[in-house]
Image (spheres, grey):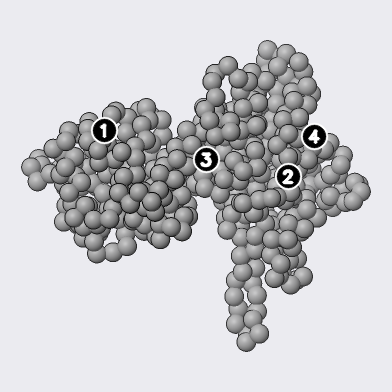
Amino acid sequence: MKENHLEDACLEWLAGLGWTCVEGDAVSPSSEPEARSRYSDVVLEPRLRAAVERLNPGLSPGEVDEAVGKLATYGGQSVVDANKEAYDWLRNGVPVERIEADGRRTVLRVRAIDPAGPNDLLAVRQFTIHGQKIRRPDIVLFVNGVPLVVIELKNPADLNADIGSAWNQIQTYKADIPQLFYYNLLSVISDGTVARYGSLTADLGRHSRWRLLDGKKVGKGQLELEVLIRGLLAQDTLLSFFQGFVAYGGAHGGATTKIIAQWHQYHGVLKAVERASDALLHRKDGKGGVIWFTQGSGKSLLALFYVMALRDRPEFKNPTVVLVTDRNDLDGQLFETFADSRWSLRAVPAQADSREDLRDKISGSRQAASSSPRSTNSHRKPGRPLCRCYATEPMSLSSQTRRTGPSTASVRISTPRRARPSTAWRSTCATPCPTPSIWA
């Protein structure tokens, strides 16, 4: 099998998912009808315009022109910071100013992508782009004319061409045709045997395997690339992933980083949110369930994506989310994760300094707080902080439990329970929970 055979297989899988698959010449500036004006253009403006008009029927022609122009010609000094702003526009709407009849100025948010679908899905093989150099990524996936996914494949018959080579090629594209990555959701790299996906800022080791197909975990015997294409790049999954499983770090002043979920975080959060919704609307017992993960599997990021998902669900009505841990070092890790990604949370996390402060934060405002059992236990060693707490404006409790016994668990639970009797509880743990009846 050669690289072009691998491209053929990918396009066949994509076509089966509803993607229209074409060669690069079909979207060149000389194509009929014209797909773009210049080879340096990476947004297919006619397709974007059609989507904006369809999704925003109340816009004037001038407002359509402004929204399409802002998105199609977007540029930035930093590829990552540009990607962050473009993601905000694609997810929440392109900002367009409108002058009302009474002279007031308002800002509209113009939708370019419909997360519920349907959308215009196009897969282009050998898409020619002019930048610092002329480059042709193997396959580029466009949603409503916007390039969201880049797929780079390497010849399976070449022993020197592996996913490391594919990742290096993506880095070359970022340097030579950076405009393609202003809109990028994720990149896929494969040598036919191994297939991984990752974010704009992820190094090779942070690229992950996708193991869900039709919502179920697949075995190790299935071809990784086929599972990734047919699983992650199906329209419903891709747009769900786009809408709720992207975060940006760097709020502490460091370099901006883009974080996307691994398959188990995506799967776990969807299940957790449905369980929380069921506990709220139907069971009415406050039992949010348990997610059991292995150590080092990314529970902090799962908690981040879970809170983001709760804030997007209308039935939770701006819930308070309390994160409880059993170790001070994990407290710090969680707080850093949430604080560093506060742009994505659309809230500023906070820490409580004492048990009383924890109670005040829960009962006296729409913020939330959490603590470790050591923190809320009055028999503490001198110099040890009473508690470290993380708060977001969003009412449900997400708790980290590992080694604590029933006695310390009851101490930990009592304060939030008295402050908020309607609290719903969820645990993410690396070992079985000591008090399963609380969570089940």
On the rendered structure, is 290 left or right of 87?
left
Q: In the image, which disc is placed on residue 87? A: none
Q: Position of residue 8 (x, y in %)?
A: 78, 26
Tell me which corner region of the image, top left, top right, bottom left or bottom right, holds residue 199: top right
Disc 2 residue type (three-letter): Leu
Query: What secondary structure is marked by label 3?
Result: strand
Disc 3 residue type (three-letter): Ile
On the rendered structure, is 212 left or right of 361?
right
Q: Earlier in the sequence, mark 1 or mark 3?
A: 3
Q: CA distance from mark 4 to mark 3?
A: 26 Å
Q: CA distance from mark 3 to mark 2?
A: 21 Å
**Residue pointed to by mark 4:** 126
Image quarter hosting the N terminus:
top right
Mark 1 surroundings: few (<14), some (14-19) or many (≥20) residues within 10 A = many
**Residue pointed to by mark 1:** 433
Q: Position of residue 284 (x, y in %)?
A: 33, 52
- Asked whether the viewer can see residue 329, the reply is no
Residue furthest out toward the bottom? 102
Choose mark 3 or mark 2, whichever is in front.
2
**Residue pointed to by mark 2:** 121
Query: What secondary structure is marked by label 1?
Result: loop
Q: Residue at x 77, y 18 (%)?
A: 2
Q: Are marks 3 and 2 in contact (CB under 8 Å)?
A: no
Disc 4 residue type (three-letter): Gln
